[in-house]
Amino acid sequence: MGLPPLNSTFNLDRSVLQVQQSLDDLQRQLATGKKSVTYGGLSNERTLNLSFRGELAEIEGYISSVDNVQIRVDVTTTVLSRIRDIAADTKSDALGNVYDPQSGDQTSFQASANAHFAETISLLNTRVGERYIFSGRSTDQPSSVTPDGILNGSNGAAGFEQIATERRQADLGADNRGRLAIPVPGAAIVTVTEDNATSPFGFKLNSQSSSLTGTTVAGPAGSPEAISATFSATLPNDGESVTLNFDLPDGTSTSLELVATTGTPQNSNEFQIGADANTTATNFQAVLDTQIQTLADTELRAASLHAAASDFFDYDDTTPPQRVNGTPATATSLTNGTTTDTVFWYQGELSSTSARDSALARVDTTITVSHGVRANEEAFRTTIKNLAVLAVETYPETDSNALERYRQVTDRANINLSFGGNTQSVDNITAEFAVIESTISNAKQRHEDNSNLLRGFVDEIEVADIYEVGAEILSLQNRLQATLQVTATLGSISLINFIN
Amino acid sequence: MGITQALNTAVTGLNVAETGIELIARNLANAETPGYTRKTLSQSVALRGSEATGVTVDAILRDVDSFLQTQVRNSNSVLSGLEVKEQFLTRVDQLFGTPGNSNALDTIFNDFSASLQTLITAPEDTVRREDLIGKAQTLSQQLRTLTEGVQDLRQLAEDSLFSAVNDLNDSLNQLDELNDQLAAEANSPPDLLDQRDRFIGEIGQYLEITTQIDSLGRATVFTKTGESLLQASPTVLEFDQKGDINATALYSTTDADRGVGTIVLRTASGLTIDLLASDSLDSGRIGELVNLRDTVLVETQAQLDEIAHSLALTFSNKSVTSTAAVVGAQTGFDIDLTGIQSGDVISLTATVNAGPTTTNYSIIRVDDATQLPLSNDVTPDPNDVVIGVSFAAGVGGAATTLNTALGTSITVSNPSGNVLRIIDDGATNATDIDALSAVLTTTATQDDGTQVPLFTDVTSLALPYSNSLDGGSQKLGFAGRIEVNPNIVNDNELLVRSTATSSIGDPDRPAELYQRLSENLFTFSPSSGIGQTDGPVSTTIAEFTQRVVNLQTSQAEIAQREFQSQSLVTSSLNDRYSQSVSVDVNQELTLLITLQNSFSANARVITVASELLDTLLRA
């Protein structure tokens, strides 16, 4: 078989062309560093590559979310730890601090409570980036109004001071007897009667106990409730006593013991046993009346202040702040505050849903981290409520009941700030955030490891190895040279060259 | 016998040698002429009676292996089809972008998804909201660009078909002329035969053909399915080229519905045959162009539409549950269909107690009566019975229609407002209503739940995308029209605020949208070419998008491989053929030397004879 003419050798054309195309492609790989500019060129590894790229983008999204959340969680934890310290310091100082009224009739402890109150409010208005982190979903709103606005009111709306004053007037009543009527007995019967069956104000008769011989102490009964002490011809003996138990507006209770004495009363709670039932009843009523007035000016007022704080600070999406309905001294009910007449101290999201769920972050395929926090959560509310209670009111030395009242107020603050029972504490929230912190840190670590791994895989598929490409170019060059050389040699072997 | 006879014989030898040399000269001169086959001389002993009187030229022959020739032609036909396919699909591959680059569909999708995911963490951040809008716009833009690219390719196929049909007509005409010439010549000149083979080869590149040589020596050409392209006279192929091809321009056997051109064969008698309808074309350049235009690229578009469709619906779908309804002994369900859009689906499960057989009905709102009744393929679910119902006359009107459609054992009514009540036959107990629910399309951006129509159809702002079937499927070509809801572009807070009073920091809407995009499974219609009719693909949109990219780009790779392997086959066939017919210079030169010797020998005989005669005359 003879040799076909050189240029009709289709195979040769094609193979030279192929080598040249391969060279072009390798040059492109060298220049771009990529094995292929299209998915088609990735061959079998395309499916893997698409899936890796998808996962990589997802993971990078997660890492970005984690970074974002981490800053928030860090800031939140810092704020929480400071508020926790404030609550703890206030709690310990509330117990047994020095009653040292300064100018303005407030103690130095009150001044520090005032400063702590302002600091706590300011902490609750912390902002991370564009976000007020203590406002739940209302991230564009500071969580609370200014400390001054809360205490003193603003734009005609009443602040805590006014709410507390109204509540005090309502609890004490016009005659400062805590809404109790203790009329001078016409006979041998002394009655103590609440002014209104449904009114939340003043002392509420809870129970009584009596060891008075020959005297019938009955009640509380009736509507409004009343306790009666009916003295008889058989008079009580010396040292026998009757105890009245009262419920106070803030949920605490107190009691009053009156002791019968035959001699001249030595203590303020002693009443003299008279010659007959009527005289004894009159003596009893007089001591009771004085004692009630003192109790009203000390413990009832302290309880009233704490109750006012609850009225003012504890509200939710369904119940607004409460305030005295009508003329305080004669009022018999609370009414809903409105935004025009009452300062709503909390400006963030009001919702009955979980506060944590008010901010979400997807940090993994199945993990959503709820890391929202609201300034009106119980722990914060309890803290600022008690700080506000301590910050207001004056305790002048000229007032003989002031010291006792001050003790009652601070003792209650001490108890409240120990977050007893089922009360949510700042520590509870801090613990939740510690879990969040560890969840997102773990997620981030996992994502970064995965991301590196995936990036390696993707690069392996997409990136052209410069050494491999170089070697291939060399081998192709050799092949091309050899092909052309052989072709040239074959081309010269023709009869034409041998015929003359 | 004598000297004179020797002289005459030598002269015939000289003639044959001259003819042979002339033929060698012709062969060598045409060595590089396309289609030229090597000609050889056939010679034999010239006889007078039983006596040899010299040598004579019988014929000039060409040596063609016609079986190999047919093989080469068919192989070339396949190759030129594959070449077109490879060119087009490489373009599709390029449309899907460079892996990992910002022009790759999957990268754009992933970016969108990641942006939505980070918005959950910081919904109040206006930069992130803007970023998400931007990513959504890029995604919709990319779907539109891809659609444009795919439709441009279909237009290119259309234009190429036009020129291919013209060229084919030209070749047929030239072949016809050649046929006439060949018929006129007594013994077919081999050079004309070469020409004829060349034209047949050209025609073969356009479509697969069979040829026969009839008794008159004319070549006749038929399509694979037997339609005659050339007999006594050529048939004319007509192609009604259409401009402005878009996703809704599809092939149909009905002229009125046809949005693309078709190839009509017009015989001399005036008979017309639609070659596309008769499926005569499936290989060759024309066959492959038709395949690309009407099948491959249409499927690519269907997949893009499916992505756009799922993106729009996943964000705007609202599941509506039903409440139990009891009327006397009849029990069933009430469902509130307020806001039902054309294309929305109500799912009803009912059992016929005899048997029992449970049927899933998909009741679809279709106001356009021309689209009814619907085929069961309208929904991806392979096991449902699809009923199209017009809501043009409200829920009441639809209830009346449904009441008829569902038979006497099921009662459908409209007790109040937009409530649809479907109850069984009560005491008769022939049927039971098992379940009733609906998936409606939300059109409002606020106060209708956490879902939101993020993507809308650019042509119908008043009517967001709900996969409506009125006036044709809204899904068809939706990838070319999808855009981000302009209301959300104007007010990006709508990405967060699901009600007018929602806080800007509320993560619920972004979280819900991300959940729908990344985790909720969407059932994709098998008509897109992914998934089977009896087992539609149910996966996340991300996963489906990856599948589309994978499938589309792998087609290019497969086409490239097919083309390469076919060109290897074709080139080896070509090599064999050309080696058998092409001019071998060395062979010709060897022959030349032989002829030269033969010429010299004969000339020597004449010289000797001449000398002998001289001697005789001088003696």
Image (spheres, rainbow, N blue to C red):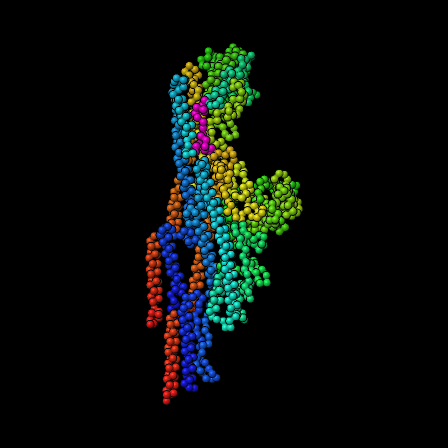
Say which quadrant the N terminus of chain B sits in: bottom left
x and y percent of residue B458 in the render? 52, 43
Q: Residue furthest bottom?
A: B619
x and y percent of residue A148 in the render? 43, 23
Residue at point 44%, 80% (across, down) = B45
Residue at point 46%, 27% (across, down) = A345
Give residue A119's quadrant in the image: top left
Instruction: Between residue B197 and residue A100, name the one nearer to us.
Output: B197
Range of residues picked out in magenta: A131-152
x and y percent of residue B478 in the render? 52, 47
Q: Can residue A487 be seen in the rendering of this structure? A: yes
Rendered view: A43 above or below B314: below
Decide whether residue A169 is among the magenta residues: no
Instruction: Between residue A468 and residue A449, name the one nearer to us.
Output: A468
Q: Can residue A378 be seen in the rendering of this structure? A: no
x and y percent of residue A80 in the render? 40, 31
Q: Determine the main secondary structure of the stretch shown in magenta.
A: loop
Instruction: Between residue A329 and residue B602, name the one nearer to us.
Output: B602
Decide whether residue A149 is among the magenta residues: yes
Say which quadrant the C terminus of chain B sits in: bottom left
Q: Residue furthest front?
A: B618
A145 sits to left or right of B399: left
Rendered view: B558 above or below A54: below
Rendered view: B447 above or below B387: above
| Number of numbered discs overlaid on the protein picture | 0
Instruction: Between residue A133 and residue B615, name the one nearer to us.
Output: B615
